[in-house]
Amino acid sequence: MNAMAQKRIVVLGAGESGTGAAILAKTKGFDVFVSDLSAIKDYYRDALDTRGIEWEQGHHTEERILAADEVIKSPGIPKEAPIIQKLMAQGTPVISEIEFAGRYTNAKMICITGSNGKTTTTSLIYHIFRMAGMNVGLAGNIGSSLAWQVAEKEYDYYVIELSSFQLDNMYDFKADIAILMNITPDHLDRYDHEMQNYVDAKMRVIRNQTSDDAFVYWSDDPIITRELKRYGLKATLYPFAEAKREDLAAYVEDGRLYFNKPYAFNMEQESLALTGKHNLYNSMAAGISANIAGIKSETIRKALQTFQGVEHRLERVARVNGIDFINDSKATNVNSCWYALQSMPVKCVLILGGKDKGNDYNEIADLVKEKCCGLVYLGLHNEKLHGFFDGFGLPVADVQSMKDAVNAAYRMAKKGEIVLLSPCCASFDLFKSYEDRGDQFKACVKAL
């Protein structure tokens, strides 16, 4: 699409994604206007001002927005927002920043999605590519805005973590390597509480793939297996699973992790930097992706052995009087907490709660009974947690601040046990973000 045919671009939301989209649109010669219902952070305001991009904050000027030829929407804005409904009703194209950025780069796109594991897998792939000396950018849900990088940098590869919200408004964009870790219920509040709507969003990662492309996925996921039958996929399939099968691109046998295609090599499972079953899958997906990109097996091995892990994801914080504190603030859904509980080697006090996204806690019920010695409910509205967990016979505490949560958990835990922050919920009732929640947890633990 050329700038002449696409004159007026409006960007809704001026965070990392929106600001990046506006900068790219400006460099491509569009008439750009940015509108954010909230206050724009100083950093992003300065970035827009220095490039002469017009913006507004605290309100939407409807006539200007509705006059756009195309609108780039930040992923945090739901389709139900009144301004989006009006744009859709009049037929104005509403796209994501990733869709827009994809038009202006020929770099290879390695795109990772899934309900859980995507941040670790994305970071791991980026680590391998960097270790291999590739010219690579990190973008999407983590890293910098893809559009901003396309505007001002020149990379051969982008490793992009994609949420379902980013995938929702992608149409012509194509992943050269698409990676789907798993699909479990999440964000159902944004999908009319219909699981299939969320599943359809995740499956968009394979949209537009050709026979030159690759699709890497966990083949033991029942939803992915079912959905694949509905798609006439042209891409080469690279399934992975724990138990050996002839069709798998990666599996484990006798304590060794085997990679089969496109090039065969193996390594000791014990030498992986990341432990736990979920991290085994993350390592498989990352290793396969690097293998497809032609990175040497020695480099992949070394990278999988040296990776440091991701902040706020099963991050060890400290040991206080024999009690280990683990920050898993990134567990914003029930399945993430399931993975965390499954990996606990001893009894733990679980801190959970926040903004519920239509959670079904049955998934972790058995693990809570088996692994937990206490529960701390951290949120403004803990009624649902009380209703579900109070009958388990565990000690519980009800708190509205991180300091109280850490103190309550510390009192409940005994020497040799773990305090685990793995909230199952979004952070927005009490915190700015899951990072803010995790940072506060770490600060409170260090103050004990």
Image: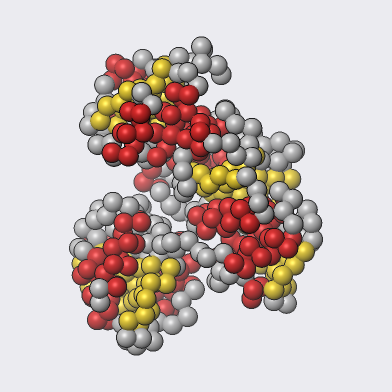
Q: Who is closer to the viewer here, 362 or 49?
A: 49
Q: Could you tell whether 279 is left or right of 358 in the image?
A: right
Q: Is residue 106 above or below residue 307?
A: above
Q: Is residue 323 above or below residue 207?
A: below
Instruction: Pinpoint residue 291: horizontal percent, then vertical percent.
Output: 72, 54
Left or right side of 7 for 423: left
Residue 44, x across and y down, in percent:
34, 36
Q: Is residue 345 above or below residue 117?
A: below
Where residue 52 appears, as percent x and y from the top left, is: 36, 23
The residue depicted at 71 percent of the width and 36 percent of the height is 210
Whether residue 91 is visible: no
- The image's colouring method is secondary structure
Residue 40, horizontal then vertical, whole percent: 28, 36
Q: Quadrant of the C terminus?
A: bottom left
The reply to whether residue 186 is in sight is yes
Q: Nearer the viewer, residue 371 or 403?
A: 403
Q: Quadrant of residue 325?
A: bottom left
Q: Split into 4 quadrants, where in the image is the N terminus?
A: top right
Q: Residue 310 vs residue 265: left or right? A: left
Q: In the image as oriented, which residue stretches furthest toward the bottom? A: 415
Which residue does the image show at 42% across and 79% down from the upper left? Answer: 370
* Residue at the image position 51 percent from the left and 37 percent from the top: 149
